[in-house]
Amino acid sequence: MALSISNAGLLRAFVFSFCFGMCKCYYSIPLKIYSGRFNSSLELDLSPLQDMQKTSGGDALSLASDPAGLVNFLDLVNNLQGDSGRGYYIEMSLGTPGQKLNILVDTGSSNFAVAAAPHPFITHYFNIALSSTYQSTQRAVAVKYTQGDWEGELGTDRVTMPKGPNGTFTINIAAILASDGFFLPGVNWQGILGLAYPLLARPDSSVEPFFNSMVRQIGIPDIFSLQMCGAGLSASNTADPAGGSLIMGGVEPTLYSGPMWYTPLKAEWYYQVEVLKLEVGDQNLNMDCREYNMDKAIVDSGTTLLRLPVKVFNAVVEAITRTSLIEDFSSGFWAGTKLACWGKGETPWKFFPKLSIYLRATNTSQSFRITILPQLYIQPITDVDGTMDCFRFGLSASANGLVIGATVMEGFYVVFDRIQQRVGFGLSTCAVSGGSRLSEIAGPFTAADVSADCSSGSLREPLLWVISYALMGVCALVLLVLLVLLVLPCRRRDRSGEITDESSLVRNRIK
């Protein structure tokens, strides 16, 4: 899930709200979870569904357990459940006595928020009245998503993770008291774990995110890694298999094979990276690399699809159409409003090309390539009367930048190394089907043929925030001057006891 705030809109919103008293502000974070429950047909309209939205090579931090002895990473393998369609979640125990909830893992936001009131689509919730250690901060928080929203109060409480770092720690919690379109049918989680940086926390960055609190309180290294194993699984499957692994505090080497390739972070808010090039099959799209990073490119586990800026998305669809062996294909499939169905047991993947994303390496003159096979982006959904298998397109157009979501992440073991400000990609050991890998990684390649900074064509939002705060300061100064000018004519009582204004006093002094 990623904050969806336009550059110009963000600037205007901050300044306008401060100077003119717009006291209630909502932040748009697109929730991109597919519920996996709908009636199927060959002409199925999916539009109502929420589209959930080192240098070159080298070894990662290869630790089988962290140096402080707080975590044995092998004990954390398979601590996630779910799939890309309904989200990947981990079990936690909140409060005293502990109440167990499943929490969605999201690297595209920073709040830890849990249901704190009944909802028809969830089986249970965090009852703050039953926790002797819950403390409200008396601060309201509201978050609006592209489809759905929630609001509640901020508080703190104790949290333990049955399959996580040892110990109990006190965490900021947003208690969701009301929501609309946030919890969906078919999901089995009751809250969201935002793993991004404090800059994205709501209502402001003073709300310390969950992982930051863990690092500070129990001393684990400031690094976590994620393996998502739902590739090729139908999102209509009612059973939730062991969906992957969230390793907090380091890297578990048994979860990937081959080298780990790292790309540097462009900024510490989202996990923003720099995309240099896209290929469809062996065909380079030959676009200005700034188009790929318009207005940012991020790695986000809470977004189901690979989301591309509109111009890039259209170019990819056109290239796939030319490359595909399917001559006539419904436009609704590319738009995500219709499924493509084949006879039972038939697979469509042979008709589609590989997709490759080139990322800048930590040696900035080089790049590396991550590639997904069609099995990752032509995704099984359901069958029709047991006679047909249906699939959806795992890419979508985006107005808020490029998002490397679960469609791509399911092919890789992804390392979020916050110590060295980089994101790593290694071949996931679970991205295999029928003995064949569903993803590839290669490099190094030269990056000399691309711009020195592929994101230089657009202002990034952290900079805009700084500008916005500066302009708010100017507004405050102007308002202060106006206030002083209004106060100066106020009438005062002079020595004779008469009421006179300030200008009269000045004249009297002159005399």
Image (tube, rainbow, N blue to C red):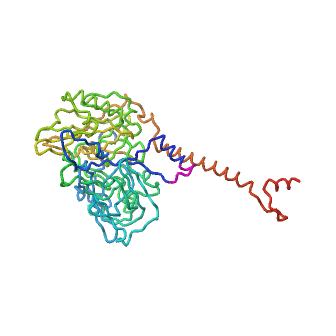
Q: With 100 as the anchor, is 474 left or right in this view?
A: right
Magenta region includes residue 20: yes
- Quarter-wise, where is residue 390 in the image? top left
Please count the marks in the image: 0
Q: Does the magenta segment cover residue 373?
A: no
Q: Is residue 487 above or below residue 131?
A: above
Residue 180 figure quarter: bottom left
Q: Give the percent coordinates (x, y) of residue 252.
A: 26, 52
Q: Quick one: quadrant of the C terminus?
A: bottom right
Q: Position of residue 426 (x, y in %)?
A: 26, 44
Is residue 59 visible in this depiction of the protein?
no
The front one of 468 and 289 is 468
Instruction: Give the extent of the magenta segment.
Output: 17-23
Q: Closer to the camera, 475 or 287?
A: 475
Vertically, is 246 above or below 350?
below
> Residue 7: horizontal and vertical position, in percent?
46, 41
Residue 133 at least partly seen = yes
Name, please, the residue furthest toward the right: 511
Q: Position of residue 130 (x, y in %)?
A: 34, 71
